[in-house]
Image: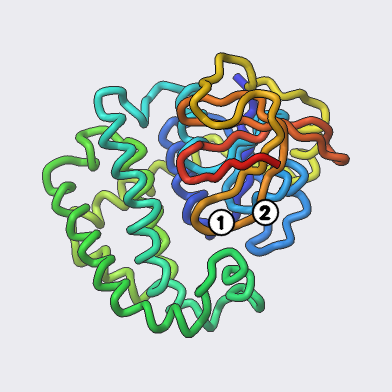
């Protein structure tokens, strides 16, 4: 099996989503610490501009967005499954809800409680990614966002009163997506009561934290770039669909449709119902293939 290299940082909530899955599967993975803020000079040679964390690297294949990252991990290491076929649709719906609506409500009350501890420039950095991400906006949004977070936690706890995990007795991507938002709350000590006051939720958190780190091995960013430079893209074959408005060989620009407007420019190598792969040449690492989900990203002729 190929080496999985996860570019992450410790406080990243979406990295925690992937880390929980890697730990649950108890599979070997290599961890590269990336900066909390831009610039990210050891990441952009791989992605061409995309700066969100985490990013999964397998040789010279670079996977962006946790939805796609989890799908690739599942394809390579299907046992134990986190996207069980009979539950794949409902798991994806919960994942999308947690990654977007729930997460956006968790952010303001958590960040407000951390204001005095944030590194200089953090809010400016995030405002460059997300218009309106300012101290004033966070303070203003926090009370309502915390109320909405409480409703979300109630729904999760209600389901966990019936089973060990959200979709039954086994951990799935639905749990990973909801867990990373709940785990992020714990960065603000004043919000821990939101978890502890809901016993079923608190027990679920402890169960997932008990997975540990899995078979993690740290490595440097320089080592990861060397690996990319010595490899060639290996996950670009397969039939492409023709309904996308672009085709293999077209030069395109890929950008998120919500926040983080950094782009990847490259040549389309494959288009499936759910994924677009573009190849690009980088002066530092050579030819790489950057993989994106189609959902949540705009693709335009370049």
Q: Residue furthest left?
A: 162
Which of disc 2 and disc 1 is earlier in sequence?
A: 1
What residue is rendered at 33% in x and 72% in y?
Answer: 191
- Examine the rendering and report whether any part of residue 182 can be seen: no
x, y percentage for residue 282?
82, 39
Pick whichever, 135 or 81, lies toward us: 135
Pick whichever, 75 or 16, lies toward us: 75
What residue is rendered at 63% in x and 70% in y?
Answer: 125
Residue 146: name its quadrant.
Answer: bottom left
Task: Please state the total of marks drawn on the protein image.
Answer: 2
- In the image, residue 236 above or below residue 151: above
Task: Give how far apart the Cα atoms at labels 1 and 2 are.
Answer: 9 Å
x, y percentage for residue 254?
62, 43
* Secondary structure state at the residue bearing disc 2: loop
Residue 124: name its quadrant.
Answer: bottom right
Mark 1 or 2: in front is: 2
Q: Which residue is mark 2?
A: 34
Name the quarter where the C terminus is drawn.
top right
- Examine the rendering and report whether any part of residue 225 can be seen: yes
Pick whichever, 173 or 282, lies toward us: 282
Neighbours of disc 1 within 10 Å: few (<14), some (14-19), many (20+): few
- In the image, residue 126 above or below residue 259: below
Q: Which mark is residue 10?
A: 1
């Amino acid at each position: 099996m190929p080496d999985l290299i996860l570019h992450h940082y410790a406080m990243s909530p979406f990295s925690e989503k992937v880390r929980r899955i890697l730990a649950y599967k108890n599979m070997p993975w290599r961890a590269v610490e990336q900066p909390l803020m831009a610039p990210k000079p050891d990441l952009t040679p791989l992605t061409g501009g995309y700066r969100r964390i985490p990013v999964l690297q397998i040789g010279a294949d670079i996977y962006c967005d946790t939805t796609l990252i989890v799908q690739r991990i599942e394809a390579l290491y299907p046992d134990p499954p986190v996207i069980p076929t009979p539950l794949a649709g409902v798991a994806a719906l919960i994942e999308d809800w947690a990654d977007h609506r729930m997460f956006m409500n968790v952010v303001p009350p958590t960040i407000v409680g951390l204001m005095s501890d944030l590194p200089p420039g953090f809010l400016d950095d995030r405002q460059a990614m997300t218009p309106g991400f300012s101290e004033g906006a966070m303070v203003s949004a926090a009370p309502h966002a915390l109320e909405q977070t409480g409703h979300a936690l109630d729904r999760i706890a209600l389901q966990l009163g019936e089973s060990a995990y959200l979709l039954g007795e086994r951990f799935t991507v639905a749990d990973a997506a909801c867990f990373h938002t709940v785990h992020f709350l714990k960065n603000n000590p004043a919000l821990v009561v939101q978890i502890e006051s809901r016993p079923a939720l608190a027990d679920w958190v402890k169960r997932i934290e008990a997975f540990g780190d899995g078979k993690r091995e740290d490595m440097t960013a320089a080592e990861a770039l060397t690996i990319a430079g010595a490899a060639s893209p290996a996950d670009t074959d397969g039939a492409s669909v023709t309904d996308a408005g672009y085709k293999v060989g077209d030069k395109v620009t890929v950008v998120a449709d919500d926040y983080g407007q950094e782009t990847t420019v490259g040549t389309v190598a494959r288009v499936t119902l759910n994924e677009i792969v573009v190849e690009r040449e980088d002066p530092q690492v050579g030819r790489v293939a950057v993989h994106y989900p189609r959902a949540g990203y705009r693709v335009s002729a370049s």
